[in-house]
Image (tube, rainbow, N blue to C red):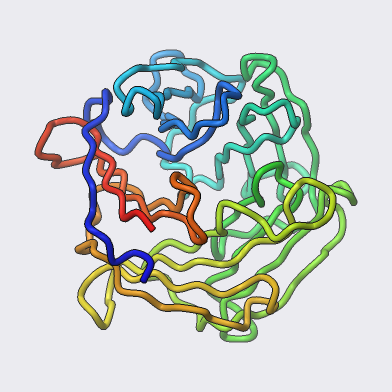
Amino acid sequence: MPYDTEVSTTATVFDTEDDNGIWTFADLTGDGSLDLVYIKTRATDSGKVELHAASRSSAFQDRTANTPTAFDAVDEHPAASGHTFLLRDWTGDGRADLILVKTRDTPGGKVELHVAAADADYQAYALQTETVFDCEDGGAWTMTYPRGNHLVYLKTRDCGSGMVEVHAAGRGGGYQSHDRGEPTAFEAEENGTWCLAPRGVDDGEGGGGLADLYYVKTRETDSGVVEVHAATAESGWQDRPFGIVSSFAPGEDGHWVLADLNGGDVPDLVYVKVRDTDSGKVEIHTNEV
């Protein structure tokens, strides 16, 4: 079964620090490898949002990026300030661009997309646009992999249906029209991390279509350990192929990430532990499929 394998632990080059941003995996160099990336959004030396990366090929010991971007640093944690930062290859050059989904305090009252391009060292914008969505913070904002062909709002509270809802706007329409807006098989709750699988169902356009929905439940689980639940995009998120007990004990000292590190049928579950680590370094704990 997925997620019941032994957890492997890797200490990285990064020192532990206060939670001043987002930890994720992305290809910043275009070599096809997913490196560990720290999107540092506050308390930066430059006063800008910064990208810090360590290469997977070095077992996350060599730094490959230490880059200020065009975005101003934010005072609060991104989730509390209406700033969602993502890494997707929006421009299609093989390197992940930095994307801001701004969901609060926009001039037009609409959710905005801002894309800082990797080919400009994240100093110039490839896109700045309003979207069809009104500003709202009742869930998680994300984009599909690998190119951000859909802006997706995973609404997890105040849902009219009582179920978690998936709302999407497509790149083909300039993110100006709703492509999807429907309830899923999951009852609305917030005891973990809601996210899309890091690969989309093929849309025939090379950009990846809408993706399976995953819920990494880290609190109030029946099993007492972290659980992974999924609903498939092909079924309109109605078919739940599994709800699996993982090998992880619950933890609140880091970030839970689904990453396609090992090419399995389902993504790997990764806990990026940023506080209270045995090594004194940021650690990657991986439950490989």
Q: Which residue occupies 82% across, 64% down?
A: 178
Decide if residue 41 is in sight here.
Answer: no
* Position of 226 relative to 134 (above/below): below
Number of numbered discs overlaid on the protein picture: 0
* Position of 279 relative to 151 (above/below): above
Q: Which residue occupies 65% across, 80% down?
A: 183
Q: Nearer the viewer, residue 127 or 82?
A: 127
* Position of 34 relative to 150 (above/below): above
Where residue 12 sits, quadrant-wise, is top left
Quarter holding the C terminus is bottom left
Decide if residue 172 is in sight here.
Answer: yes
Residue 270 place in picture, x, y as percent: 35, 50
Q: Nearer the viewer, residue 255 or 234?
A: 234
Residue found farthest to the left? 278
Quarter holding the N terminus is bottom left
Residue 237 place in picture, x, y as percent: 63, 76
Question: Is 8 positioned to the left or the right of 237 in the image?
Answer: left
Q: Which residue occupies 65% across, 48% down?
A: 145
Residue 249 place in picture, x, y as percent: 19, 63
Q: Which residue occupies 23% across, 37% down?
A: 10
Q: Nearer the viewer, residue 57 or 281?
A: 57
* Position of 82 relative to 20 (above/below): below
Q: Nearer the viewer, residue 30 or 48?
A: 30
Question: Is 14 positioned to the left or the right of 2 in the image?
Answer: left
Residue found farthest to the right? 173
